[in-house]
Image (tube, helix red, strand yellow):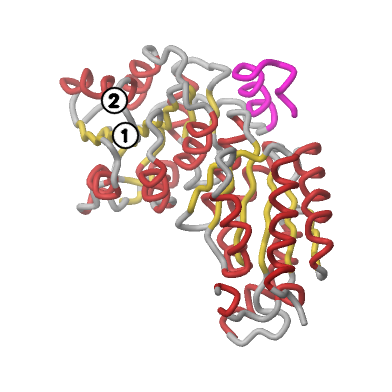
Amino acid sequence: MLNRRRLVADILAERGETLLVSGLGAPSYDAAAAGDHPLNFYLWGAMGSAAMIGLGLALARPERRVLVITGDGELLMGLGALATIAAERPRNLAILVLDNEAFGETGRQAGLTGRGVALSGIAAAAGFAATLEIAGANDTSALYELLYRTPGPVLAVAKISLEPEPQVLPERDGRYPTQRFRAALLGPERATR
Amino acid sequence: MPSTKAAARKWARDVHQVLREHEVRQVATVPDAGLIRLLEIVAGDTGMRLVTLTSEEEGIALAAGAWLGGQRSALLMQSSGVGNCINMLSLPALCGIPLLMIVTMRGEWGEFNPWQVPMGQAVRPVLAAMGVKLFPVEHEDEVGPAVAAAAGIAFNGGLQAAVLLTQRMLGAKRFADQE
């Protein structure tokens, strides 16, 4: 089992110009703990939206790699997005699922991925270009290759430990990170229009 | 008589023209019979990406991602899909992200299917409760101006707006419109 905080920090250290969307709860804390960045869009709500935000962003900016980091429960709430994304075939979109097989934020209730539901298999069957599932640190070079260099859409599932990590809270407001993201990507004059 | 074929083509062209003028580049939909003409026109426009969704709330997240990336979008759906969108409307509301929705109504005027009535009747209060500005349209020649008004308030104000194409305008569902 991987440590989520270390895994996300290691992955984001290699991000280059990658645009990041993090799903609500712990994935947003993991991304913030790795170091705040203007091209991070942190979700604090809208459960089930992360993958589709990634698609809209990937279609708008085909020249940039887009990485979505989210949890197993968050992805399952918007599972149809895997079909929508597969049909659109964005070559620049990568999804990393931090899979602790539980609802970690709400009391560690058991999730569905611990009972045989395989998100990488669902993505592959939907038509994702490549998928991967890793459970140990030995596999991380294949993970980087998939997330940053393999033509998308790609999805990786990383089985992570349920051990709690300290909360590292990104900006709580929604408007500021939205405008900051647009300013960093598009230039300041387009941030609000 | 509401909605002859020629009139349906006309308002669909009007909407497409408004979307072009507002530089809408991503159009997301769960299709509806009332949207046939407009979806055909969008599909034929190489300047617009038509994204078919599995469920309507995906389109709100798509619009947010498009906006982050510098593109404008529109979301086209039937009234039943509005119910799928409720919690997801938190995202554009909190982040000040423009959202332009065009909703073809069911369950209100001459509806033959009682299953359409509960959600159809709930569309306005549900959207209003989530802060979406409403632009109901009862006449075909008002569709283009209504979409222009909704697009203006959405894209200039970072607000969420929905044009409701009423069943009185569209006519009760009949499949003859598909030729």
Q: Mark 2 falls on what kind of element?
A: loop
Percent from the top left, x then y, of residue A41? 55, 28
Q: CA distance from mark 1 to mark 2?
A: 7 Å
Report the magenta residues as a range: A175-193
Percent from the top left, x then y, of residue B101? 68, 53
Q: Decide: is A157 above or below B101.
A: above
Does residue B7 show up magenta in the picture? no
Badge 1, how many Cα within 10 Å: few under 14, some, many 20+? many
- Residue depicted at 45% across the width and 57% down the height: B54
Does residue A177 show up magenta in the picture? yes
Percent from the top left, x then y, of residue A24? 49, 38
- Residue depicted at 60% across the width and 61% down the height: B77
Circle 1 residue: A154
Chain assignment, label 2: A
Instruction: Give the quarter of the figure containing the N terminus of chain A.
Output: top left
Mark 1 residue type? Val
- Residue depicted at 31% across the width and 51% down the height: A110
Q: Main secondary structure of the magenta part?
A: helix
Chain assignment, label 1: A
Q: Decide: is B153 above or below A54.
A: below
Circle 2 residue: A150
